[in-house]
Image (spheres, helix red, strand yellow):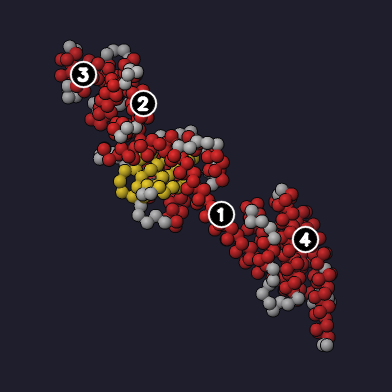
Amino acid sequence: MPTSTVSRDENIQRVREGLGLLTAAAMRRLDEEVAWYRQLPAEDRSYVALVAQTGINAFVTWFADPKQTPHGVGEMFAAAPPELTRSISLQHTLQLVRLMVDVVESHSDQIASPGYERELREAVLRYSREVAFSAAEVYARAAEVRGAWDARLEALVVDAIVRGDTDDALRSRVSALGWSGRGQALVVVGEATSGLDDVGTADLRRAARRAAGDTLVGIHGDRLVLVLGGEGDLVTAASSLLGRFGPGPVVFGPVVASVTEAPASARAALAGLAAAPAWPQAPRPVPADDLLPERVLTGDRTARRVLVAQAFRPLREATGSVLDTLSAYLGTGRSLEAAARRLYVHPNTVRYRLRKVSEITGWDPLDARESFVLQVALALGQLDPAD
């Protein structure tokens, strides 16, 4: 047998015998130099150690026959559960690879036969490259699976918000989707653009996060539902995303304190979307509270209660005959003079009392649209048995 063959066989045997030394050195370096490793739970540390040990074993096996594809590269990551990719990042994994290379290089003089040190170092460099590619592939698969799971979870969360579920699981689910929980929340609904696929949805999600910070995206049939959250101006954020909706009305519900109260915002927004066709001149987007009269016509009991509580009752309880003055003004075709004659007062008195109506309710009876809101509120209050 040639001397070179005998020497290589001896070198392979020495590398195999040095396996324990390499493993012990790698574990010691991990514990001494890698801060994130020391901070992991004990179970995750054991899995990381198993990955490192499996990698060194696979290298020694491949070193015996380097003409073959590196053996065990995929298996070294299969030794740990998939959840490990959530505990350590791809950058951490590549740091493990670099540490393994450094350990083998630093011990090459002890392990390799004289004259074969360079061969050992070149082999570990080639092998580490394969490991790095394998790690990237593992993390890419994990990200794909996690993305599909996150998409399903997001759909369930948005569906729960639309249905009005407010159980404790909602907060934990949105946290799992990366919702920061800082600031308020707002729900926007409108028609979805045609052909909104996964790529388009991902692009919409990125745009919404740039605008508001936190976001959830849901497609319900032909409707697009956005849940926005953050510490900025959510109404402005919703307006900036107007072009992401299809044709037709876009309605946003009231701003609420947190995502756990988002079902109330969603309920108002969806009720407004159903009623929006009754107001063709409505702005786009339009607040759901600006559609209270139209929502009443669709049978929305919440809108009915809001109008009575915010307009009729404060006017009925106010002094100065403001309720009678508003009723006379609306009942005479919105004429100051006709209302003054009916009430036996000066037109300026009517004008003064109507300004009081605006101060009390926030709706101006001299504005055509807002006078309609007030007229509906008066009718509802007079029909309500409690009033």
Secondary structure beneath dot 2 equals helix
- The numbered mark at residue 86 is none
Q: Note whether residue 255 is visible.
A: no
Three-letter amino acid code at the position of disc 2? Arg
Eye-nearest disc, 2 or 3: 2
Eye-nearest disc, 1 or 4: 1
Eye-nearest disc, 4 or 3: 3
Q: Position of residue 161 (x, y in %)?
A: 46, 40
Q: Residue at x 33, y 50 (%)?
A: 246
Q: Which residue is mark 3?
A: 328
Eye-nearest disc, 4 or 2: 2
Residue 279 located left or right of residue 187 = left
Q: Which residue is mark 4?
A: 26
Secondary structure beneath dot 1 equals helix
Three-letter amino acid code at the position of disc 1? Arg
First reached walking from the N terminus: tag 2 or tag 1:
1
First reached walking from the N terminus: tag 1 or tag 3:
1
Q: Residue at x 66, y 59 (%)?
A: 93
Q: Say above or below: 331 vs 268.
A: above
- The numbered mark at residue 146 is 1
Q: Position of residue 74 (x, y in %)?
A: 66, 66
Q: Quadrant of residue 141?
A: bottom right
